Every structure is written in C-alpha cells, then in structure tokens.
Amino acid sequence: MSLYYEGASLLHRLTPLTKIVVTLIAISHMVLFPQLKYILLHLIAATALLVTARPRIPIRVWAGALAVVVGHGWINAVMVRSGALLLDLGWLKVYWEGLELGITLAARVMAIILYSILAATTTNPRDLAVSIAKLGVDYRYAFAAYVTFRMAPLVRRDLENILVSRKIRRIKTRVNPIELMAGILAPLLSLVVRRSTLLSISMESRAFGALRSRAYYWDVQPGAGDYAFLAAFLAYLIVGTCLLTY
Amino acid sequence: MLKGISFSLEEGEWLLVLGPTGSGKSTLLLTLNGIIPCFIPGELEGEVRVFGLDPAKVGVAEMARVAAIVLQDPEAQVIAFTVEEEVAFALENLLVPRDEGLRRVAEALRAVGLEGLRREAVDTLSMGQKQRLALASALALRPRLLILDEPTAHLDPASALEFYKVLSRLRGETTVIVVEHRVDYVWEFVDKVLLIENGVVKYFGDPEGLFNRISLPYLLKTGIWIPEVLAGELVRREPGELGGPSPPSSPAIMAKQVSYRYPGGREALRQVSITAEEGRVTCILGPNGSGKTTLLKLLAGILKPDHGYVLIYGQQPRPEKVAYVMQNPEHMFVARSVLEDVALSLKSAGYGEGEARRRAYSLLKEYNLEEYADRSPFELSQGEKRLLSLLLMAALNRRVILMDEPTFGLDRRYAGIVARELMKLARAGRTVVVATHDTWLVSAISDKVVVLREGRAVFEGGVVEFLSQPKLMTEASFSPPPLLEALVGELGDLEKALLTYKRYLLYPGGEGA
C-alpha cells in the first residue's frame, strides 16, 4: 500500500502534519534562497534524515527520481546559450553558466524529492487522512486520498497483467491510439471502475460518510517531539542561512 | 434483475440463496442493506423489511447498525492498513465510543482467531486470514443480519471450512443470508433455501424440500451447485466412456530446482522441481500463498527464476510460446467485440484476416458463445468471460496451456464446460497445467497432481496416489469432495469411485463423453 512501511524511526513518530509543514518550509526556503549553497543545506538535512529513518525505498523509485533530476538539470543546462563555453560538440554547446544553473536546479529537485520520499515512506496513509480531517477538511474527502493509496498497487497489478496478456497473444503495442485505447485503457478502466464500486460498497455498507463526523480511535495529535523537531529544523535553516550569507 | 421475489425469515435463521450465474443473487443481497437503490441506483418495487426497517428509506448507514455484508473478494473490501484499524473502521464511522469500540474490535478478532495479528499490516495476511478479517469487521458491528456474498470463493478448502466453522458459532443468534457455490460447506447449517432463476423464485423453503419439489436433473440443468452427497441417484447411471489419458510421454515442461523471490518481498518458491507431460492435465494444489500462481508465471516465462531453470519442450519459456489463462478474464480482452478478440488470437496463430474471422465464428459456435459475437467482451457474464478467456488461449494453438483458477466463482454449468474443454485440449495432445482450489476439479480432470506448501513442492504424482494419502491432502489444504468419499465407501475402490465421480461431474445430464 503506497510507499509507506511500518517503523519506529524519528520520522515515523512525527505526525503527518509536521512532515507536511517541514516540507513546505523547505520548499519556501529554497524559493527565497535559490543559490546552490543554500540548497546544499537541504540536501544535507534530507540525507541526515534518510540515514536516521533508513526508509525502504524501491529501486524503481530511486531510478525514477534520478531520471527526473538528471533530465531536469540537463535540459536547463543546455538551454543557456551564453557565457564561458565549456563543451562544444557542434550540435551541442554547454556553457559554465548553464552547467551551474543545471546543477542548482537538479539539486533543488533532488531535495524536494528526498523530503517527499521521506514523508511518504514514514507516513501511514490513514494518519495522513486523519490529519487532513483534523484541519477541518470533510473527512470523506480526506479519506478519498487514503483510498487512492489503497487502490494504487491493485491498479498497477491490473495494468501489468493486461500488458503480459498482450505479450502472450503477440498483440503489437505499435498500434494507433484508438486501438491502444481499446486494448489497454478500456480493460484497465473497466477493472478500476469495478474495484472502485466494490470498495465503495464495502465502505458505504460500513456506514462511511453516513454521519457528519466520525470517531478516531487512533488520534493523530502533535506532541512535544513534533514541536521540538520543527524548532530544530527552523533553527538549522536560520543558523545555516546566516552562516552562508554573512 | 429481480422479478416479484418474496420470502421471509425468522430471527436467527440461516438462508442459502442458490441460482445460476446472473440469476440476481448478488442484486438481492445488496437490496437487503440498502446499497440498492441508495448507492447503486435502480428501480425498486415491492416491499423490503429488515427487522422492521425499510433499507431504501433509512439508508445504508442506518442499515449498517443491523445488517453487515461480507463480499467475495477479500482484497477488494479491505480499507485500512492494519488489522485493528480495519475492524474499527465501521465503528468509528458510527461514532461508537472509543473504549467500547476497541472492546468490540478485540472480541471480533478473538471470534475469528486473529487476535494475535491485531497490529499486523493487512497486506501481510493470507487470503484466508483476510476473509476472516472481513468477517471480523462485520461481526464488530454486532449485526442482527449477516449477508455473505460467496465469502469463500478465493479461499483454499481448509480456509473455507475454517471460515464456516467460525461462522457456525453464530447459529441461532444471528440471521445469516449467504450466496455460496461451495454448498457442501454450508448445507448443514442452513434452515431455508431460496432458489432463484432469471430473477424469479423457483423455490423457497426447507433444504430437504428442495429435492422433493424440484427434480435433480432440473436442478442440474439450471447450472447451480447442489450438495454432492444428495446427488447419489445420478452417479449410479450406466457409465459412458470418458476417454483416458494418452500413454505417458517425456516431460513437455520441466522445472528444476526453481527458486523465486519477489523484489523486496518474501521467497515465493524454494527449489521446486516438477514435470508436466504432454496430453495430460497437471493440477497444482496448495494453500493460499503457497506459490501456485508464481510457479505458473515462471512456467510461462513471465517471471524469471532466481535459481534453477524451466524448460518447455527443451527451450527457455517465453510468454509468446505458451497459452496462459489468467485468474481475471478481463485482463485478457483487447478488442471491441468477442468475434474480433477471438480473430486476433487466431491471427497470432498464423491465420489470415478472412480465415481468422471465419474460424473465430465457428469456434464461438463450438463454445456456445456465437450469440455474443458482436458484443463487447466486458458485457458478458462472469461464466461467459471465463469461457471466452479459455477460447482466446485455445485459439492461439500453443502446445502448452497454463490456467490460474479456471473455475473460480463459476456456476456448475460453466464450471462443467470449462472442465470438459480442458480435458478435450489435453486429449488433443496439449500440455495442460492448472492451479486450482476446487477440489471437484482436481478429482474430475487431473491426471497428475503437484502439491506446493510454503513455496516447496511436497508431492508430485498421480491423482489416485494423492487421494490415497489423507496426511498429504491436509498439507495441501485439500478436502476430498463428499461424493467421492461416499463413492469410495460404497464401491470400496478409489479408482472406480474416481471414474464414477468424473462421469457425474463432467456429464451430469448423462450425455456421455
């Protein structure tokens, strides 16, 4: 179910809200201080948390993240067409300024991805739903996100089976879009609709959404640890920013 | 779907709803807790009262206080991440105070034997445990009416028996309405039977009265499953010729010391070595989670073994070289119409456009599906979908056919057709390997049995040899079909009993092979 796994690390013990707030603070800080030296602060913080929490991140997630970071950085690097020339292949020119920009943007994306992965792997989707509901959002919408996490692996399995079936039947994937729609999306959609209907029946018949509010037996309240973590993170950013600026 | 259905039950009575695929059984169940028409819109006429409440008027939530439902697929109904959260879900929705709620969670988990797994992640449970969890979620509501829609369809026989053993403790206290294909497991508990055909009640009354009022041949013709031990008169008919397997040949499939671990997950198979011969049906048995589907995928070349190797006719397995019928037929449909879909398989087998369409139509006729030729495959009933998925693979004309739970959830008529087609394919020289939980299917069609347990092959041999070893059957979570046991007692010979049983299962109308 989603990327979450059970654990007792520092990050596991924090409420989802704390992790959301920390991520938002980090992103805002990177927008206000976009230079590479400030972004390194976040990469150091995220790496330290990564070492502490040791999340079980699938290789495909790392591979995806790396592809995004490298792709994003590289595209931005080659877009810059002025300054000191670093590499000239005729059809491709890379400038020092471009490389610097590319590395900075790649580092920023990497930091955001790391923070997000840390939050996703250490946050029980249910706790996230409860936290969102506690913020005053209708619990039906909050749980909708939770149920999406629940459905995601099942839908992925359906898609894998559909693709395997096409392989067995030697049905070529180089087809026109309409055929592709009929062959892959139609069965997938049909399965998703059926799964959603069954899950909805299961939820409705257990009185989900019947009353305006619901009880939470495992409440998610920020504790002293959350406030301490938030304060430490803010202090780290303030001190780090000051040291790097002055 | 339903036309003028009338019946009533006393509190504490158990009702078994029988009927062929598409007869309206599930529709009836969903009207009893208000899902129809409150959630799934429909035109509802007449009167429904459940403990004095009109489900359509009071709504699903209010009905949840008196009626709970357990659906067929344990995975489709799980909502929460951990066991206790799942059981507490409905109680939280109904604002049951925390202390009382947690007490009820503990009671419900104790009742289904999952108290030790309270804090476990739901995803780590076996299918049998997940279905018991679904039952616990229902029981925590303390319902006066428990509605069960084929609750054991995904379970191995031992887990299914365990499920009803747990449930039997509610007899006399809770009213239960159950739709169940494996009628033998539940027959002894039910007080009333409701038979529906095409949305119309054909019978409502005591279980014994069903066979007095409606003849056995008619019941078999409707396609419903009936308790095997009550079908005695049919098995004593003059035997027809079934046609035995071809003489043993060299293995078409060979798996040697095969191990497989899912990425980041558990070891699904450990040093499994098996063979499957041409012209024979090999059944792979084992409890939920024993590695049956993984083994099939390795034989198909969909997965690659971590250790060991698989050979299909001396070559590495490749998905393009085998026919693999998946558990969910909808994964296999690609075209807009049934005819086009079959024609696509035939084209893959080397037929030209025109010839493929002509042959597709004649194959549809052979499978009695010609009337659906122009319909979308997704519009068919579950039984028809399953039959079509088999046809799609048979049309590929491959030497090896692998099937995952080919008869799961099917009524007797469609299950019989699928079983006969598998026998036909094997007798035509194909190598057929089937992973199944259906004990009747194993007894009816298998020439050879492979038993998996916790990822290891613990038995490989003939079906007679397998059925003569009670300890092995227990290890495989297999309980022999009641009729087969009765026949063994009567005839005193397992092989003769098996032949008679096959004849009854595959040709109940006496049409012969």
Image (cartoon, rainbow, N blue to C red):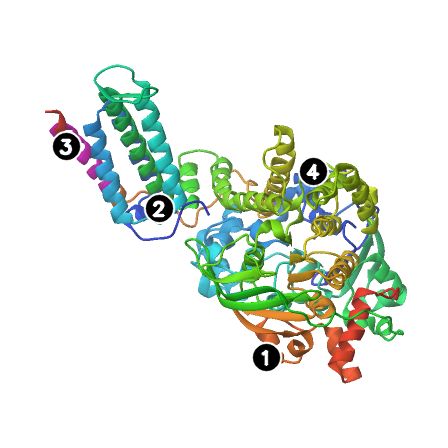
Which numbered dot is residue B335? 4
| Residue under label 1 | B471
Horizontal side, residue B288 vs residue B495: left or right: left
Residue A11 visible to the viewer? yes
**Residue B331 image offset from top left, x and y in percent:** 63, 45
Q: Which residues are magenta?
A: A228-243
Q: Earlier in the sequence, mark 4 or mark 1?
A: 4
Categorize mark 3 by other alpha carbons within 10 Å: few (<14), some (14-19), many (20+).
Answer: few
| Residue under label 3 | A239
| Residue under label 2 | A122
Q: CA distance from mark 1 to mark 2?
A: 45 Å
Q: CA distance from mark 3 to mark 1?
A: 70 Å
Q: CA distance from mark 3 to mark 4?
A: 63 Å
Name the subunit of mark 1.
B
Q: Is residue A235 magenta?
A: yes
Label 2 secondary element: helix
Residue at the bottom extreme of this rendering? B492
Horizontal side, residue A200 vs residue B24: left or right: left
